[in-house]
Image (tube, rainbow, N blue to C red):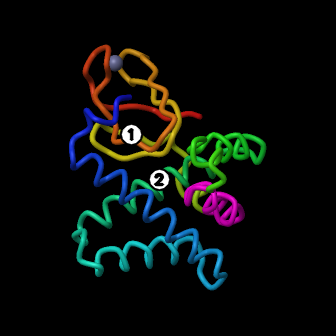
Amino acid sequence: MNDEKHKPEEHEDVGLYQKMADRAAELMQEGRKTLDEALKKASEEISSGGEYTREKSEKIGEFLRRDLTEVGKKAQEARDTVINAVEPHRVAAGVQSGLSRLLKTAADTLNELAGKSEQALEYKTGEVTSPGTLTCRDCGKEMHFKATVRIPPCPSCHKTVFRKSY
Ligand SMILES: [Zn+2]
């Protein structure tokens, strides 16, 4: 992926996703919040900051929650793989991403989140998601992402619905 081709709104969405993951991880690590509360509070804080609308914060918050839910459905060993795969450039630089901190801190609550949704979740073009593999539901084409992205259309058939794996 070439960053310079990304549109401003895409940058904004991805930046907001990362900011929210960082803030929710901080709130969890302070130890006074459940995962649900931390996600809600992070979203509220960000929208009351005025830089982003409430609607946008809530939308991005749902994308973050969905990624956490998907990871929650995996066995512990698979989760570790995901955690290690999340934003490798930041890990290499000695900075642990908000998302991987969230995944570690919230390991227990991930089981609860996962229990609430048995079905594989759908990911659509224009939504934001953490690193991983998206498989086109129509033609089976795989896209591999090493950083948080706003999802493009399928490069092969131009459809817009995907399954996610890691
Ligand atoms: Zn396709």
The image position of residue 88, as x and y in percent, is 60, 41
The image position of residue 159, as x and y in percent, is 27, 24
The answer for how far apart the CA atoms under marks 1 and 2 are is 9 Å
User: Is label 2 in a helix, a strand or a loop?
Assistant: helix
Read off the residue under disc 2. Answer: 66
Structural crowding at the residue carrying mark 1, measured as other residues with C-alpha within 10 Å and reported as few (<14), some (14–19) or many (≥20) = many
Q: Which residue is drawn at 57% across and 42% down?
A: 89
Q: Is residue 115 above or below residue 81?
A: below
Range covered by the magenta-colored residues = 96-112
Q: Residue at x 63, y 56 (%)?
A: 96
Indicate which quadrant contains ligand 1: top left
Q: Which residue is drawn at 66% across and 81% down?
A: 31
Please tell me whether residue 98 belongs to the stretch shown in magenta. yes
Q: Which amino acid does label 1 sit on?
A: Tyr
Q: Are marks 1 and 2 in contact (CB under 8 Å)?
A: yes
Taking depth in this image into account, of 61 and 30 the one nearest to the observer is 30
Task: State whether label 2 is within 8 Å of ligand 1.
Answer: no
Please tell me whether residue 35 belongs to the stretch shown in magenta. no
The chief SS type of the magenta part is helix
Give the mark nearest the N terminus, 1 or 2: 2
Residue 123, numbered circle: 1
Residue 10 lies left or right of residue 19; in this view the side is left
Q: In which quarter of the image is the N terminus?
A: top left
Structural crowding at the residue carrying mark 2, measured as other residues with C-alpha within 10 Å and reported as few (<14), some (14–19) or many (≥20) = many
Q: Quadrant of residue 42?
A: bottom left
Q: Residue furthest front?
A: 93
Residue 112 lies left or right of residue 13; in this view the side is right
